[in-house]
Image: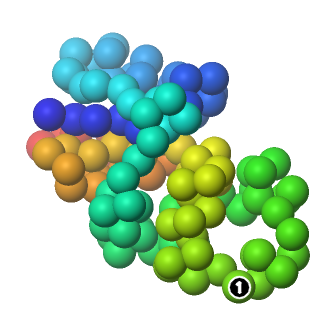
Amino acid sequence: MYLLYGIKNCDKVRAAKKWLESKNIQFQFQDIRDNPVSNSNWESWIAYFGMDKLINRRSTTWKQLPESTKQKLSDLTAINLLNEFPTLMKRPLLTENNKALLIGFSERQYSDHFKG
């Protein structure tokens, strides 16, 4: 089972949902603000994608963080920040059976992944 993580008002999340639906790919959606992500998921996603790919440094939330917080960013502090500010996560994030697959959305990326 595919699980798509994001926030419901994010354009990239909406595009990913629309793409998955158009290809008749069954998935569930989890809004990370309404239903927070577990620390173990954050840990596994950081291990899989890397903190720099998981954290959206172009987000308004990131830009509003104190410079000292940004400078001290580590895997552990990233988990704490993502718990406090889930909108820091680059969206959407797609998993299958709890295994991270894709982060962000582009039609090409999704098409390439779902070819096989």
Left or right: 63, with 111 as reference point? right
107 vs 44, nearest the viewer: 44
Residue 6: in sight, yes or no? no
* Relative image position of residue 13 (x, y in whole percent): 52, 30
**Res 7 quadrant in image:** top right
Residue 101: in sight, yes or no? yes
* Relative image position of residue 41 (x, y in whole percent): 33, 57
Q: Residue sitting at 41 percent across and 38 percent down?
A: 5
Q: Residue sitting at 51 percent across and 66 percent down?
A: 79
Q: Quadrant of the N terminus?
A: top left
19 vs 67, nearest the viewer: 67
Q: Quadrant of the C terminus?
A: top left
* Relative image position of residue 113 (x, y in whole percent): 26, 46
* Relative image position of residue 20 (x, y in whole percent): 33, 24
Q: Is residue 88 above or below residue 36?
A: below
Give the residue number, with chain letter if any, for mark 1.
72
